[in-house]
């Protein structure tokens, strides 16, 4: 397994291009299953999770052509000849459950293995199943698989989510486009990735209103056509690289960045003493000379502070002045980076869903273990700001979500290299 060696100390200066959003691409790709005509996605990120989704779709019968080194994906699902999403692929990535809705909508049946993914909490799929049942599917759980059937097709329904779920909203949106009649999703997720999915589905001929608000209304149509759609900018990759100069000093411009993707996050950066300037090309970030101030952060569904940036923010606050409190409200087990940061000298007390970070002057490099995708990158950022060498082990999670991370950081002056494992 590969490791990443980071030598801390130097300032970062330069520009970093931000890729298309992994989480948007993973929900846009299954939309191909809804149409016999090709769906082309441009601005796709080059990540192992995208390869996993491609392998899953290909196993169902989708033909995929990749151009521009994987940045343009054309998917054609003329024939869906297999209706089983196999455990061997699904276990690698939780987002695999997003094929359930489109397969049911298109073919009236689907068998999907229960998913795996990052170990950041129990992460059940009960809401996804609730949605499909509400749309008229019969669901059975057997041998680790979801067996779903809608012999007479899906029917529109009013579905009120008990709490916000990005994935369940996406699955509902995908499935409802071809259901008979009207579907109303209440308490729906409002993330930019949901808006991106709705825009792509509309380009394919779907009738959707209210995306970006908590009530989405979908009028089912008989068929969807092909389309070409550009994947929205990855706001989590953006936020991650925006934090990099806050660890090291210097100034980084994140190309393609827009404040409206990350308003709550930008407000927190401002409070912590990090300036963000919108330029014609993206977002330019630097920290104030006074250093980083401790702040309190609570993760929430969009438009709140994203859970996917909590680990990176915690790493930064380890060397802020005073005490910071971080409250994780989305996933119950998402502080696994805390003990690893502790190995670098951080003072973090975790109590249930709240972490208290007492700022220290400096972190020191150490061998650490990457436990999940965002935790991995938080350790790299911490290493860039630390004294000495940090060896981040088990970085396979990183490759699921960050393309060419070493190259992007190195172009701004970071001392970072990949050590290829056996
Ligand atoms: C998506 C993102 C992930 C991000 C998360 C929250 C993708 C591929 N992943 O994950 O990076 O951290 O949104 O912004 O887009 N839940 C249930 N039952 C369900 C579904 C979810 O209890 O059926 C719970 C989850 O365990 C979690 C909460 O709901 O506690 C929110 O999860 P959800 O928004 O669904 O996250 P994902 O779509 O899995």
Image: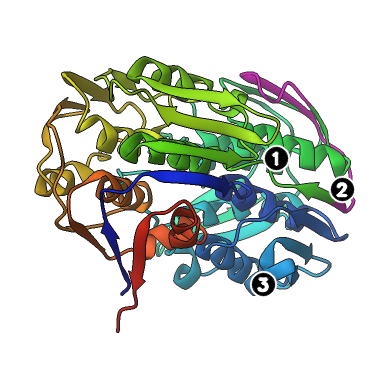
Front of the two marks 1 and 3: 1
Q: Secondary structure at mark 3?
A: helix
Q: Residues within 10 Å of mark 3 (few under 14, many from 20)?
A: some
Residue at the spot of label 3: 58
- Mark 2 sits on what residue? 224
Q: Which residue is mark 1?
A: 197
226 in magenta: yes
Q: Residue at x 17, y 55 (%)?
A: 388
Q: Which image quadrant is residue 154 in?
A: top right
- The numbered mark, 3 or 2, whose residue comes first in the sequence reads 3
Residue 56: % across, % down: 59, 67
Q: Percent position (x, y) of residue 93?
A: 46, 59
The Cα atoms of the two marked residues, 3 and 2, are separated by: 20 Å
Front in this rendered view, residue 167 or 220:
167
The residue mark sitting in front, 1 or 2, is 1
Residue 251 inside the magenta-drawn segment: no
How many marks are shown on the rendered structure? Answer: 3
Which type of secondary structure does the marked residue at label 2 adopt? loop
Say if mark 1 contacts mark 3, CB within 8 Å.
no
Rendered position, 249 above or below 58: above
Q: Residue at x 70, y 43 (%)?
A: 175
The quadrant in which the C terminus is found is bottom left
Instruction: Determine whether, in the image, residue 316 is placed left or right of residue 367.
Output: right
Disc 1 within 8 angstroms of ligand 1 (CB): no
Q: Earlier in the sequence, mark 1 or mark 2?
A: 1
Q: Is residue 368 left or right of residue 33?
A: left
What mark, if any, has residue 151 been given in the picture? none
Ligand 1, by image quadrant, is: top left
């Amino acid at each position: 397994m590969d490791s990443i060696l980071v030598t801390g100390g130097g300032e970062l200066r330069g520009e970093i291009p931000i890729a298309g959003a992994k989480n948007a691409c993973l929900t846009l790709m299954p939309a191909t299953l809804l149409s016999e005509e090709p769906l082309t996605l441009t601005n796709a990120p080059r990540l192992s999770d995208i390869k996993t989704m491609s392998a899953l779709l290909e196993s169902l019968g989708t033909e995929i052509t990749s151009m521009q080194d994987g940045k343009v994906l054309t998917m054609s699902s003329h024939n869906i000849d297999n209706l089983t999403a196999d455990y061997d692929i699904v276990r690698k990535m939780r987002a695999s459950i997003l094929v359930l809705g489109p397969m049911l909508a298109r073919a009236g049946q689907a068998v999907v293995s229960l998913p795996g993914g990052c170990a950041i909490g129990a992460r059940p799929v009960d809401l996804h199943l609730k949605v499909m049942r509400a749309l008229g599917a019969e669901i059975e759980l057997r041998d680790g698989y979801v067996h779903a059937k809608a012999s007479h097709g899906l029917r529109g329904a009013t579905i009120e989510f008990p709490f916000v779920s990005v994935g369940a909203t996406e699955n509902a949106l995908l499935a409802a486009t071809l259901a008979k009649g009207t579907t109303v999703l209440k308490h729906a997720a409002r993330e930019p990735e949901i808006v991106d999915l709705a825009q792509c589905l509309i380009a394919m001929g779907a009738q959707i209103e209210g995306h970006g608000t908590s009530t989405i209304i979908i009028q089912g149509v008989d068929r969807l056509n092909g389309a070409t759609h550009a994947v929205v900018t990855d706001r989590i990759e953006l936020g991650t690289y925006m934090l990099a100069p806050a660890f090291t000093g210097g100034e980084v411009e994140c190309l393609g960045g827009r404040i409206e993707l990350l308003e709550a996050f930008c407000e927190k950066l401002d409070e912590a003493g990090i300036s963000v300037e919108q330029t014609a090309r993206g977002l330019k970030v630097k920290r104030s000379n006074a250093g980083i101030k401790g702040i309190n952060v609570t993760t929430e569904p969009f438009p709140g502070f994203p859970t996917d940036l909590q680990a990176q923010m915690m790493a930064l606050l380890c060397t802020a002045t005073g005490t910071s409190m971080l409250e994780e409200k989305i996933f119950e087990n998402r502080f696994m980076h805390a003990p690893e940061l502790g190995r670098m000298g951080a003072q973090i007390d975790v109590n249930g869903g709240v972490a208290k970070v007492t700022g220290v002057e400096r972190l020191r490099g150490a061998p650490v273990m990457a436990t999940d995708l965002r935790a991995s990158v938080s350790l790299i950022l911490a290493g860039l700001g630390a004294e000495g060498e940090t060896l981040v082990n088990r970085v396979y999670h990183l490759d699921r979500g960050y393309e060419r991370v070493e190259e992007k950081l190195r172009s701004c002056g970071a001392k970072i290299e990949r050590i290829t494992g056996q």
